Image (cartoon, helix red, strand yellow):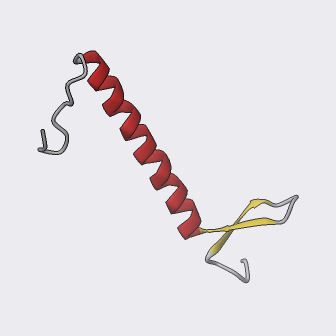
Amino acid sequence: MTRYPHLRQTEPEAGVWITESEICACITRIAFASADALIALAMLSLGGHRPAVLGRT
């Protein structure tokens, strides 16, 4: 059991620790970047027209 349960040791040999909120922020950034890439790909396949996303056109 760690003395700091809100931290995760990501590189034990280097003593690197990261908070859960930092992990979540990283995952969120990756998800948004992936969504942006998919939208750009869809736009290219539609000849530059933006597809409807989440009910918006």
How many numbered marks does the figure carry? 0
23 vs 33, left or right, is right
Which residue is pictured at 31% across the width and 32% down the height? 39
Please tell me which residue lies in front, 53 or 19: 53
Which residue is pictured at 66% across the width and 73% down the height? 7
48 vs 22, left or right, is left
Please tell me which residue lies in front, 33 or 13: 33
Quarter of the image where the N terminus is located: bottom right
Taking the view exactly as shown, the residue that stands out farthest to the bottom is 3
Q: Position of residue 13 (x, y in %)?
A: 88, 58
Please tell me which residue lies in front, 48 or 34: 48
Q: Image quadrant of residue 10?
A: bottom right
Q: Position of residue 2 (x, y in %)?
A: 73, 78
Say if 44 sits above or below 20 in the image: above
Which residue is pictured at 31% across the width and 19% down the height? 44
Q: Position of residue 46 (x, y in %)?
A: 22, 18
Q: Image quadrant of residue 56?
A: top left
Say if 8 sits above or below 3 in the image: above
Please tell me which residue lies in front, 1 or 48: 48
Which residue is pictured at 73% across the width and 83% down the height? 3
Q: Position of residue 54 (x, y in %)?
A: 17, 45
Taking the view exactly as shown, the residue that stands out farthest to the front is 48
Quarter of the image where the C terminus is located: top left
24 vs 6, left or right, is left
49 vs 40, left or right, is left
Q: Image quadrant of residue 33?
A: top left
